[in-house]
Image: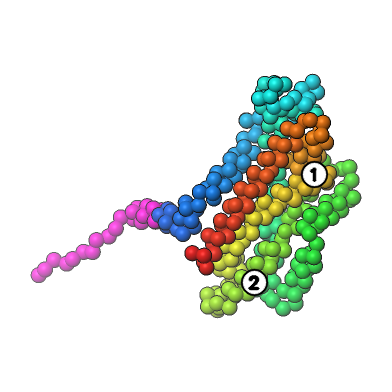
Amino acid sequence: MSDAVVPHRAEPSAVPARAGVSWVKRAVDSDIFYSFRRSRMTMVAAAIVALFFLLAIFASVLSVQNPFDPAQLQLMNSRISPLWTADGQSPFLLGTDEQGRDVFSAILYGLRISLVVGVLGVILAGALGITLGLIAGYVGGAVDGLIMRIADVQLTFPAILIALLVNGVAKSVFGNRLDAMSTLVVLVVAIGLSFWVQYARTVRGSVMVEKNKDYVAAAQLIGLPAPIIMLRHVLPNTMGPILVIATINLALAVITEATLSFLGAGMPDTMPSLGTLIRIGNNYLFAGEWWIVAFPGFALAGLILSINLLGDWLRDALNPKLR
Protein backbone atom coordinates (compact mmCIF):
# COMPACT_ATOMS: atom_id res chain seq x y z
CA MET A 1 0.00 0.00 0.00
CA SER A 2 1.54 3.31 -1.08
CA ASP A 3 1.74 6.31 1.16
CA ALA A 4 -0.73 9.11 0.50
CA VAL A 5 0.75 12.30 -0.90
CA VAL A 6 0.00 15.29 1.33
CA PRO A 7 -0.07 18.58 -0.61
CA HIS A 8 2.25 21.29 0.62
CA ARG A 9 0.51 24.14 2.43
CA ALA A 10 2.01 27.60 2.35
CA GLU A 11 2.67 29.41 5.57
CA PRO A 12 -0.19 31.81 6.41
CA SER A 13 2.20 34.63 7.24
CA ALA A 14 3.80 34.47 3.80
CA VAL A 15 0.62 35.55 1.98
CA PRO A 16 0.28 39.04 3.49
CA ALA A 17 4.01 39.66 3.09
CA ARG A 18 3.90 38.71 -0.57
CA ALA A 19 0.75 40.78 -1.04
CA GLY A 20 2.47 43.83 0.44
CA VAL A 21 5.57 43.33 -1.69
CA SER A 22 3.50 42.79 -4.82
CA TRP A 23 1.49 45.97 -4.15
CA VAL A 24 4.68 48.01 -3.88
CA LYS A 25 6.11 46.32 -6.96
CA ARG A 26 2.94 47.08 -8.96
CA ALA A 27 3.13 50.72 -7.89
CA VAL A 28 6.79 51.02 -8.87
CA ASP A 29 6.23 49.22 -12.19
CA SER A 30 3.08 51.16 -13.05
CA ASP A 31 2.85 53.34 -16.15
CA ILE A 32 2.19 56.45 -14.05
CA PHE A 33 5.34 56.04 -11.96
CA TYR A 34 7.33 55.26 -15.08
CA SER A 35 6.01 58.44 -16.70
CA PHE A 36 6.88 60.38 -13.56
CA ARG A 37 10.47 59.11 -13.55
CA ARG A 38 10.91 59.94 -17.25
CA SER A 39 10.01 63.62 -16.82
CA ARG A 40 12.69 65.58 -14.98
CA MET A 41 10.56 68.72 -15.10
CA THR A 42 7.72 66.90 -13.36
CA MET A 43 10.07 65.60 -10.68
CA VAL A 44 11.40 69.11 -10.08
CA ALA A 45 7.86 70.49 -9.93
CA ALA A 46 6.83 67.80 -7.45
CA ALA A 47 9.88 68.58 -5.30
CA ILE A 48 9.06 72.31 -5.33
CA VAL A 49 5.42 71.67 -4.37
CA ALA A 50 6.53 69.35 -1.57
CA LEU A 51 9.00 72.01 -0.41
CA PHE A 52 6.27 74.66 -0.30
CA PHE A 53 4.02 72.40 1.75
CA LEU A 54 6.86 71.60 4.16
CA LEU A 55 7.68 75.30 4.53
CA ALA A 56 4.04 76.03 5.31
CA ILE A 57 3.78 73.17 7.83
CA PHE A 58 6.98 74.12 9.67
CA ALA A 59 6.53 77.89 9.36
CA SER A 60 6.58 78.41 13.12
CA VAL A 61 9.92 76.57 13.35
CA LEU A 62 11.68 78.20 10.38
CA SER A 63 10.53 81.81 10.87
CA VAL A 64 12.42 84.33 13.00
CA GLN A 65 9.19 85.85 14.30
CA ASN A 66 5.43 85.34 14.26
CA PRO A 67 4.19 88.01 11.84
CA PHE A 68 0.64 87.56 13.17
CA ASP A 69 1.69 88.55 16.71
CA PRO A 70 1.85 92.37 17.12
CA ALA A 71 3.89 91.95 20.31
CA GLN A 72 6.82 90.61 18.27
CA LEU A 73 6.80 93.47 15.76
CA GLN A 74 8.82 96.68 16.12
CA LEU A 75 8.23 99.71 13.92
CA MET A 76 11.90 100.63 14.25
CA ASN A 77 12.64 97.58 12.08
CA SER A 78 10.32 98.67 9.27
CA ARG A 79 11.44 98.77 5.63
CA ILE A 80 14.81 97.14 6.17
CA SER A 81 16.28 95.95 2.87
CA PRO A 82 17.37 92.31 2.28
CA LEU A 83 20.37 90.98 4.16
CA TRP A 84 22.76 90.91 1.18
CA THR A 85 22.28 94.63 0.43
CA ALA A 86 24.24 97.47 2.00
CA ASP A 87 21.43 98.39 4.42
CA GLY A 88 20.49 94.80 5.31
CA GLN A 89 20.38 93.66 8.90
CA SER A 90 20.40 90.25 10.53
CA PRO A 91 18.24 88.18 10.98
CA PHE A 92 15.96 89.67 8.30
CA LEU A 93 17.02 87.61 5.28
CA LEU A 94 14.50 89.10 2.82
CA GLY A 95 14.06 92.42 4.60
CA THR A 96 11.02 93.77 6.43
CA ASP A 97 7.78 95.52 5.51
CA GLU A 98 6.26 98.75 6.80
CA GLN A 99 5.13 97.13 10.07
CA GLY A 100 8.51 95.64 10.87
CA ARG A 101 7.49 92.13 9.81
CA ASP A 102 10.20 89.87 8.51
CA VAL A 103 9.30 89.25 4.87
CA PHE A 104 10.58 85.66 4.93
CA SER A 105 8.49 84.85 8.01
CA ALA A 106 5.47 86.59 6.49
CA ILE A 107 5.86 84.52 3.32
CA LEU A 108 5.97 81.28 5.33
CA TYR A 109 2.84 82.12 7.30
CA GLY A 110 1.12 83.60 4.24
CA LEU A 111 1.95 80.45 2.28
CA ARG A 112 0.24 78.43 5.02
CA ILE A 113 -2.92 80.55 4.73
CA SER A 114 -2.97 80.36 0.93
CA LEU A 115 -2.50 76.58 0.89
CA VAL A 116 -5.09 76.00 3.61
CA VAL A 117 -7.67 78.07 1.73
CA GLY A 118 -6.76 76.42 -1.58
CA VAL A 119 -6.81 72.83 -0.31
CA LEU A 120 -10.03 73.24 1.70
CA GLY A 121 -11.66 75.06 -1.22
CA VAL A 122 -10.76 72.23 -3.60
CA ILE A 123 -12.07 69.64 -1.11
CA LEU A 124 -15.36 71.52 -0.74
CA ALA A 125 -15.73 72.01 -4.50
CA GLY A 126 -14.88 68.36 -5.13
CA ALA A 127 -17.30 67.05 -2.52
CA LEU A 128 -20.15 69.21 -3.82
CA GLY A 129 -19.42 68.66 -7.51
CA ILE A 130 -18.86 64.89 -7.23
CA THR A 131 -22.05 64.43 -5.22
CA LEU A 132 -24.17 66.42 -7.65
CA GLY A 133 -22.48 64.80 -10.66
CA LEU A 134 -23.17 61.29 -9.32
CA ILE A 135 -26.81 62.13 -8.66
CA ALA A 136 -27.30 63.81 -12.03
CA GLY A 137 -25.64 61.04 -14.04
CA TYR A 138 -27.15 58.09 -12.18
CA VAL A 139 -30.69 59.36 -11.59
CA GLY A 140 -31.10 61.33 -14.82
CA GLY A 141 -34.41 62.85 -15.84
CA ALA A 142 -35.62 66.06 -14.24
CA VAL A 143 -32.98 65.90 -11.50
CA ASP A 144 -30.22 65.79 -14.11
CA GLY A 145 -31.79 68.64 -16.04
CA LEU A 146 -32.11 70.85 -12.95
CA ILE A 147 -28.52 70.31 -11.78
CA MET A 148 -27.06 70.84 -15.23
CA ARG A 149 -29.07 74.00 -15.85
CA ILE A 150 -27.76 75.44 -12.59
CA ALA A 151 -24.26 74.50 -13.71
CA ASP A 152 -24.80 76.13 -17.11
CA VAL A 153 -25.96 79.37 -15.49
CA GLN A 154 -22.91 79.46 -13.22
CA LEU A 155 -20.57 78.82 -16.15
CA THR A 156 -21.71 82.11 -17.69
CA PHE A 157 -19.92 83.96 -14.87
CA PRO A 158 -16.17 83.89 -14.18
CA ALA A 159 -15.17 82.08 -11.02
CA ILE A 160 -13.71 85.24 -9.50
CA LEU A 161 -17.09 87.00 -9.81
CA ILE A 162 -18.85 84.13 -8.04
CA ALA A 163 -16.24 84.28 -5.28
CA LEU A 164 -16.63 88.05 -5.00
CA LEU A 165 -20.42 87.66 -4.83
CA VAL A 166 -20.28 85.05 -2.06
CA ASN A 167 -17.69 87.07 -0.17
CA GLY A 168 -19.72 90.27 -0.53
CA VAL A 169 -22.94 88.61 0.66
CA ALA A 170 -21.15 87.19 3.71
CA LYS A 171 -19.67 90.56 4.63
CA SER A 172 -22.99 92.33 4.14
CA VAL A 173 -24.72 89.83 6.42
CA PHE A 174 -22.09 89.57 9.17
CA GLY A 175 -20.44 92.97 8.77
CA ASN A 176 -17.69 93.74 11.27
CA ARG A 177 -18.36 90.49 13.15
CA LEU A 178 -16.12 88.65 10.70
CA ASP A 179 -12.72 88.02 12.29
CA ALA A 180 -9.68 86.54 10.51
CA MET A 181 -10.74 82.90 10.93
CA SER A 182 -14.31 83.65 9.84
CA THR A 183 -12.92 85.40 6.76
CA LEU A 184 -10.89 82.28 5.99
CA VAL A 185 -14.04 80.15 6.18
CA VAL A 186 -15.86 82.57 3.88
CA LEU A 187 -13.01 82.34 1.36
CA VAL A 188 -13.13 78.53 1.44
CA VAL A 189 -16.89 78.56 0.83
CA ALA A 190 -16.57 81.15 -1.93
CA ILE A 191 -13.89 79.15 -3.73
CA GLY A 192 -15.76 75.88 -3.23
CA LEU A 193 -18.93 77.32 -4.74
CA SER A 194 -16.93 78.71 -7.66
CA PHE A 195 -15.32 75.48 -8.89
CA TRP A 196 -17.85 72.67 -8.27
CA VAL A 197 -19.25 72.82 -11.81
CA GLN A 198 -16.20 71.22 -13.45
CA TYR A 199 -16.38 68.24 -11.11
CA ALA A 200 -20.12 67.85 -11.59
CA ARG A 201 -20.02 67.89 -15.39
CA THR A 202 -17.03 65.53 -15.60
CA VAL A 203 -18.44 63.04 -13.10
CA ARG A 204 -21.88 63.15 -14.73
CA GLY A 205 -20.42 62.24 -18.13
CA SER A 206 -18.38 59.37 -16.67
CA VAL A 207 -21.33 58.04 -14.65
CA MET A 208 -23.61 58.04 -17.70
CA VAL A 209 -21.08 55.76 -19.41
CA GLU A 210 -20.41 53.52 -16.42
CA LYS A 211 -24.03 52.97 -15.34
CA ASN A 212 -24.80 51.06 -18.56
CA LYS A 213 -22.07 48.49 -17.97
CA ASP A 214 -22.63 44.95 -16.76
CA TYR A 215 -21.15 45.34 -13.29
CA VAL A 216 -23.70 48.05 -12.43
CA ALA A 217 -26.54 45.84 -13.69
CA ALA A 218 -25.20 42.97 -11.59
CA ALA A 219 -25.07 45.20 -8.51
CA GLN A 220 -28.66 46.26 -9.13
CA LEU A 221 -29.78 42.65 -9.53
CA ILE A 222 -28.41 41.61 -6.14
CA GLY A 223 -30.33 44.45 -4.54
CA LEU A 224 -27.63 46.96 -3.64
CA PRO A 225 -29.05 50.45 -2.96
CA ALA A 226 -28.24 53.25 -5.38
CA PRO A 227 -25.93 55.20 -3.00
CA ILE A 228 -23.78 52.10 -2.46
CA ILE A 229 -23.58 51.43 -6.20
CA MET A 230 -22.60 55.04 -6.92
CA LEU A 231 -19.98 55.34 -4.18
CA ARG A 232 -18.49 51.85 -4.14
CA HIS A 233 -18.67 50.81 -7.79
CA VAL A 234 -19.18 53.80 -10.09
CA LEU A 235 -17.14 56.52 -8.36
CA PRO A 236 -13.78 54.62 -8.35
CA ASN A 237 -13.96 54.34 -12.16
CA THR A 238 -14.21 58.14 -12.48
CA MET A 239 -11.28 59.06 -10.21
CA GLY A 240 -8.78 59.67 -13.01
CA PRO A 241 -10.39 62.85 -14.39
CA ILE A 242 -11.26 63.97 -10.84
CA LEU A 243 -7.60 63.87 -9.78
CA VAL A 244 -6.57 65.94 -12.79
CA ILE A 245 -9.27 68.55 -12.12
CA ALA A 246 -8.38 68.70 -8.43
CA THR A 247 -4.70 69.30 -9.16
CA ILE A 248 -5.38 72.07 -11.65
CA ASN A 249 -8.09 73.59 -9.46
CA LEU A 250 -5.67 73.79 -6.53
CA ALA A 251 -3.62 76.29 -8.52
CA LEU A 252 -6.77 78.15 -9.55
CA ALA A 253 -8.00 78.22 -5.94
CA VAL A 254 -4.72 79.71 -4.71
CA ILE A 255 -4.84 82.31 -7.49
CA THR A 256 -8.47 83.14 -6.66
CA GLU A 257 -7.66 83.59 -2.99
CA ALA A 258 -4.66 85.77 -3.86
CA THR A 259 -6.82 87.85 -6.22
CA LEU A 260 -9.51 88.36 -3.59
CA SER A 261 -6.90 89.33 -1.00
CA PHE A 262 -5.20 91.68 -3.47
CA LEU A 263 -8.54 93.37 -4.13
CA GLY A 264 -9.09 93.81 -0.39
CA ALA A 265 -11.85 91.19 -0.18
CA GLY A 266 -9.70 88.43 1.33
CA MET A 267 -7.53 87.95 4.37
CA PRO A 268 -6.90 91.04 6.55
CA ASP A 269 -3.53 92.72 7.04
CA THR A 270 -3.23 91.21 10.53
CA MET A 271 -3.30 87.66 9.11
CA PRO A 272 -1.99 88.08 5.56
CA SER A 273 -1.89 85.50 2.83
CA LEU A 274 0.40 85.76 -0.17
CA GLY A 275 -2.18 87.90 -1.97
CA THR A 276 -2.43 90.27 0.99
CA LEU A 277 1.36 90.56 1.17
CA ILE A 278 1.47 91.44 -2.53
CA ARG A 279 -1.23 94.09 -2.03
CA ILE A 280 0.65 95.59 0.90
CA GLY A 281 3.97 95.58 -0.94
CA ASN A 282 2.45 97.10 -4.06
CA ASN A 283 1.85 100.32 -2.10
CA TYR A 284 5.60 100.70 -1.51
CA LEU A 285 6.90 99.50 -4.89
CA PHE A 286 7.48 102.98 -6.31
CA ALA A 287 9.03 104.14 -3.04
CA GLY A 288 11.98 101.81 -3.61
CA GLU A 289 10.99 99.01 -1.20
CA TRP A 290 10.73 96.46 -4.00
CA TRP A 291 11.41 93.44 -1.79
CA ILE A 292 8.08 93.77 0.03
CA VAL A 293 6.16 92.82 -3.11
CA ALA A 294 8.80 90.94 -5.12
CA PHE A 295 9.46 87.96 -2.87
CA PRO A 296 5.80 87.13 -2.09
CA GLY A 297 5.13 87.46 -5.82
CA PHE A 298 7.96 85.05 -6.68
CA ALA A 299 6.69 82.58 -4.07
CA LEU A 300 3.15 82.70 -5.46
CA ALA A 301 4.34 82.35 -9.06
CA GLY A 302 6.62 79.42 -8.22
CA LEU A 303 3.84 77.61 -6.37
CA ILE A 304 1.28 78.09 -9.15
CA LEU A 305 3.72 77.09 -11.90
CA SER A 306 4.77 73.92 -10.09
CA ILE A 307 1.19 72.83 -9.42
CA ASN A 308 0.22 73.48 -13.05
CA LEU A 309 3.15 71.40 -14.28
CA LEU A 310 2.04 68.54 -12.05
CA GLY A 311 -1.51 68.89 -13.33
CA ASP A 312 -0.37 68.79 -16.96
CA TRP A 313 1.73 65.69 -16.32
CA LEU A 314 -1.09 63.93 -14.47
CA ARG A 315 -3.52 64.70 -17.29
CA ASP A 316 -1.16 63.14 -19.84
CA ALA A 317 -0.24 60.19 -17.61
CA LEU A 318 -3.89 59.24 -17.04
CA ASN A 319 -4.84 59.61 -20.70
CA PRO A 320 -4.83 56.11 -22.23
CA LYS A 321 -4.54 57.53 -25.75
CA LEU A 322 -1.10 58.94 -24.95
CA ARG A 323 0.39 55.74 -23.51
Query: Is 296 drawn above or below residue 323 in the view shown?
Result: above
54 sits to left or right of 133: left
- The residue that label 1 is drawn on is 262
In the picture, the quarter occupied by the N terminus is bottom left
State the residue at coordinates (80%, 57%).
Answer: 162
Q: Amino acid at mark 2?
A: Gly
Magenta residue check for 15:
yes
Question: Is the residue under label 2 in contact with that under label 1 (CB below 8 Å)?
Answer: no
Give residue 295's position: percent from left, percent from top.
70, 36
Q: Quadrant of residue 239?
A: bottom right
User: Nearest the camera: 29 or 25?
Assistant: 29
87 sits to left or right of 237: right
Disc 1 on helix, strand or loop?
A: helix
Color theme of the render: rainbow
- The residue that label 2 is drawn on is 205
Give residue 283's position: percent from left, percent from top.
83, 36
Q: Nearer the viewer, mark 1 or mark 2?
A: 1
Q: Quadrant of residue 176?
A: top right
Task: Please report the bounds of the magenta region as a residue range.
Answer: 1-23
Disc 2 on helix, strand or loop?
A: helix
Callout 2: 10 Å neighbours few (<14), some, many (20+)?
Answer: some
State the residue at coordinates (39%, 53%).
Answer: 21
Question: Earlier along the polypeptide chain: callout 1 or callout 2?
Answer: 2
Magenta residue check for 170:
no
Query: Is 232 drawn above or below residue 18 in the view shown?
Result: below
User: Nearest the camera: 48 or 4?
Assistant: 48
Give residue 294's position: percent from left, percent from top.
72, 37
User: Nearest the camera: 1 or 9?
Assistant: 9
State the residue at coordinates (68%, 68%).
Answer: 201
Observer able to see residue 232: no
User: Nearest the camera: 126 or 16?
Assistant: 126
Q: Amino acid at mark 1?
A: Phe
